[in-house]
Image (cartoon, rainbow, N blue to C red):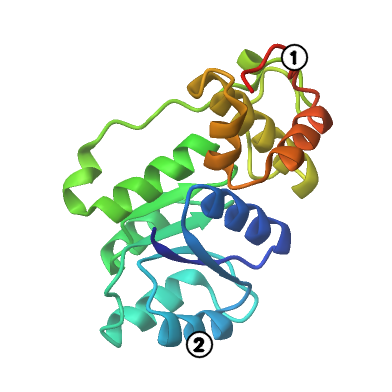
Amino acid sequence: MARILVVDDELGICELLAEILEDAGHAVTAVQCAGAARKALASRFPDLVLLDAWLPDTNGIELLKEWRHANALTMPVIMLTAHGTIDSAVEATRLGAMEFLEKPISLQKLLRAVQRALAGPKSRDLPAAPSISVKTLGPVSAPPAASLRLDLPFREAREVFERLYFEHTLKLENGCMPRIAERAGVDRAHLYRKLRQLGIAIGNRSA
């Protein structure tokens, strides 16, 4: 488990990233401005920072530059932006950012970048995993052929992610409900309710 600091001025993005990363087993602190990011960095010593390039009180590049000059970059940083340019990507990398991801970010691309960052510099050469296509798992509230995007409304993105997660886990555990409940960290009653809510068939599952 890693301690990850998420810095993004959009509350919905913060909450979605936190939920995805917590489901992946990480401890997440999410803040929405540079001032809160400074306090979190000073008190929690994160293993990784996901930093938005645009913040209300300063931009992410300036904050990265500040941390670099203060010798506070003891952890990898992944920059996030919806308005990325080559110049800003080069600048962020020069200042110490490990990766520069443009929004909307697919679920697998995000998790792969986090995996590479936590594994260290040698993992940068690993090939990127393909984005999960929603259409392979049946219809959901997002367009059938669209990859999971972080620019979706929070509730919609969470529903898409939950469906992907439980469909994958059902296949991984061959439909064994006790193992699925244990893996998901929920009791079986909650698991059954969640599967029904997502419209996932639970008939003929292993007890």
Secondary structure of the residue carrying tag 1 is loop
16 w.r.t. 178: above or below: below
CA separation, marks 1 and 2?
Answer: 49 Å
Judged from this view, the residue extending furthest toward the front is: 207
When asked about the image quadrant of residue 79, the answer is bottom left
Which residue is drawn at the image coordinates 19% and 53% (left, top)? Answer: 121
Horizontally, residue 158 falls left or right of residue 118, namely right
Q: Earlier in the sequence, mark 1 or mark 2?
A: 2
Relative to residue 22, is residue 121 drawn left or right?
left
Q: Position of residue 87 (x, y in %)?
A: 39, 56
Q: Is residue 105 visible?
A: no
Q: Amino acid type of disc 1?
A: Gly
Q: Secondary structure at mark 2?
A: helix
x then y, percent, for residue 41 = 43, 81
What residue sits 71% from the left and 15% below the top?
138
Residue 109, image x and y in percent? 46, 38
**Image quarter of the C terminus:** top right
Figure check: 126 above or below 67: above
Vertical arrangement, residue 146 with respect to residue 105, above or below: above
Q: Looking at the picture, how far across and down is residue 86, in whole percent?
A: 40, 50
Residue at the spot 39% in from the left edge and 50% down from the top edge: 114
* Foreground pick, 77 / 190: 190
Name the side, left or right, on which 168 lies relative to 151.
left
Q: Is 180 on the left or on the right of 190, as rendered?
A: left
Q: Which residue is mark 1?
A: 203
Give the amino acid at mark 2.
Lys
Name the residue rendered at 62%, 53% in the picture.
19
**CB atoms at circles 1 and 2 under 8 Å apart?**
no
When the figure is inspected, residue 89 is found, relative to residue 135, above or below; the finding is: below
Q: Nearer the viewer, residue 147 or 26?
A: 26
Q: Where does label 2 land, which residue?
A: 39
Q: Which mark is residue 73?
A: none
